[in-house]
Amino acid sequence: MTQERLLSPKQLSEIVGLSPAQIRALMNTGKLEFVEISSKTKMLTMSGWERFQKNATKVKGAEGSAVN
């Protein structure tokens, strides 16, 4: 089993182009999953980011309705 690299909010923000505050806001609202190492240390994964993108992305359908 391969282990995925854990990223800090700052590291993920640099990769995906959002601010660390935006990443933390997504974590605080439960939209972006994370691993809680301690009460002050929360880490993220790229697969978690990819799941967030898939679930949060809306594509406008042919008839004008939003489709996931």
Image (spheres, rainbow, N blue to C red):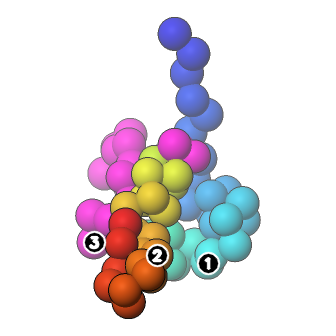
Relative to 27, does residue 35 appear above or below in the rendering?
A: above
Residue range in magenta is 28-47
Q: Distance between the residues labelled 1 and 2?
A: 24 Å
Q: What residue type is labelled 1?
A: Ser
Query: Reading the chain from its start, which is encountered first: label 1 or label 3?
Result: 1
Q: Name the residue under label 1.
A: 19
Disc 2 secondary structure class: strand
Q: Position of residue 68 (x, y in %)?
A: 37, 66
Residue 6 in percent (x, y) is at 56, 39
Name the secondary structure under disc 1.
Answer: loop
Q: Is the magenta stretch mostly helix, strand or loop?
A: loop
Q: Please, is residue 40 above or below residue 13 in the view?
A: above
Q: Which residue is drawn at 62% across and 58% down?
A: 12
Tag in front: 3 or 2? 2
The residue shown at (36%, 72%) is: 67
Which amino acid type is shown beneath numbered disc 3? Thr
Q: Which of marks 3 and 2 is nearer the N terminus?
A: 3
* Of the pair 11 and 62, the residue shown nearer to us: 62
Name the side, left or right, on which 15 lies relative to 41.
Answer: right
Viewer can see residue 19? yes
